[in-house]
Amino acid sequence: MHVKSTLFIKSATKPQQYPEGDLPEIAFAGRSNVGKSSLINALVNRKNLVRTSSTPGRTQLINFFDVNGTFTLVDLPGYGFAKVPLEVKKQWGPMIEKYLSHRTNLRGVVLIIDIRRIPKEEDLQLLNWLRTFNIPPILVVTKCDKVSKNERERQLNLIAKELEVEKAALNPFSALSREGLENIWSAIEPVLE
C-alpha cells in the first residue's frame, strides 16, 4: 500500500467518543513495550505519528488515525506490564473489549508479539476472543533484529505452537531494517476490502 496521508482524528475511551463514519478500521493490539508504535510508524512511513517510548504503557487511550482517507488505523492501549497506576490499568481491559465488541466497521486486528517472548495468557485470550467474534487476526512478530537467525527460527516455531497457528501465519518484522512491511500490508489489504 502506498500511504500518502495519515492524520490523527481523535482519542477516545468509550463508544460515544469514537469517530463517526463507516470507513473500515484496522486495530493494533499487543502487550506493553512490544513495539506497537514503531510498527505503526513504519507502516505509515512517519517517524512520530505515534509516540514511541522506552516506558511501557504510554498509550492509555484508543487513538484513531485516518489513512489516505480510505481506512482508519486504531492504536489500542498495550496490555500486561506497564508502569501506570493499577486503576488506569484496570480500565484498559473493559475499554479494549468494548471497542472490539461494539465497533461494526472493525475489519481486523494486528496482534503484535515480541519475538523474544512466549505469548502470555493475555495474548492467547485476545486471539481466542478475536476468533470467537470472527475478527481476522493479523499476527506480527516484532523486534526480529534483536535475535540471531537460529534463535529467530526457534522462537517463531515456539510462538506458532503457543498460538496454535502455522508458522507461515506469522509476519516477522524489524523496525530497524523495515523487514516485513510488504508482507504485513499484504495481510492487511484483503481484510480492508
Image (spheres, grey):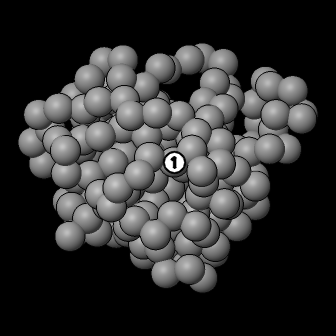
Q: Is residue 100 left or right of residue 98?
A: left
Residue 168 falls left or right of residue 157: left
Q: Residue furthest right?
A: 86
Residue placed most toward the observer, 188 or 62: 62
Q: Which of 66 and 138 is in front in this view?
A: 66
Q: Where is residue 151 in the image (x, y as percent from the top left)?
A: 49, 45
Q: Residue 67: give x, y in percent of width and height.
A: 24, 41
- Kindly state the secondary structure of the residue where label 1 is placed: loop
The mark tally for this picture is 1
Residue in the picture at 60% in, 30% down: 59
Given the image, on which type of amino acid does mark 1 rest? Tyr
Side of 86 relative to 121 (left or right): right
Q: Name the residue under label 1.
A: 18
Quadrant of residue 65 within the rendered picture? top left
Identity of the residue drawn at 62% across and 35% down: 61
Q: Tell me what residue is drawn at x 79 percent, y 24 percent.
A: 83
Q: Is residue 6 visible?
A: yes
Q: In which quarter of the image is the C terminus?
A: bottom left
Q: Look at 66% across and 18% down and name the residue there.
A: 55
Q: Dot 1, crowdedness within 10 Å: few (<14), some or many (≥20)?
A: some
Q: Is residue 79 above or below residue 171?
A: above
Q: Inspect this view and state whether residue 139 appears.
A: no
Q: Taking 118 as reference, is 160 above or below it?
A: below
User: Residue 7 appears at what percent x and percent y?
Assistant: 29, 30
Q: Position of residue 153 (x, y in %)?
A: 43, 54
Q: Nearer the viewer, residue 166 or 182?
A: 182
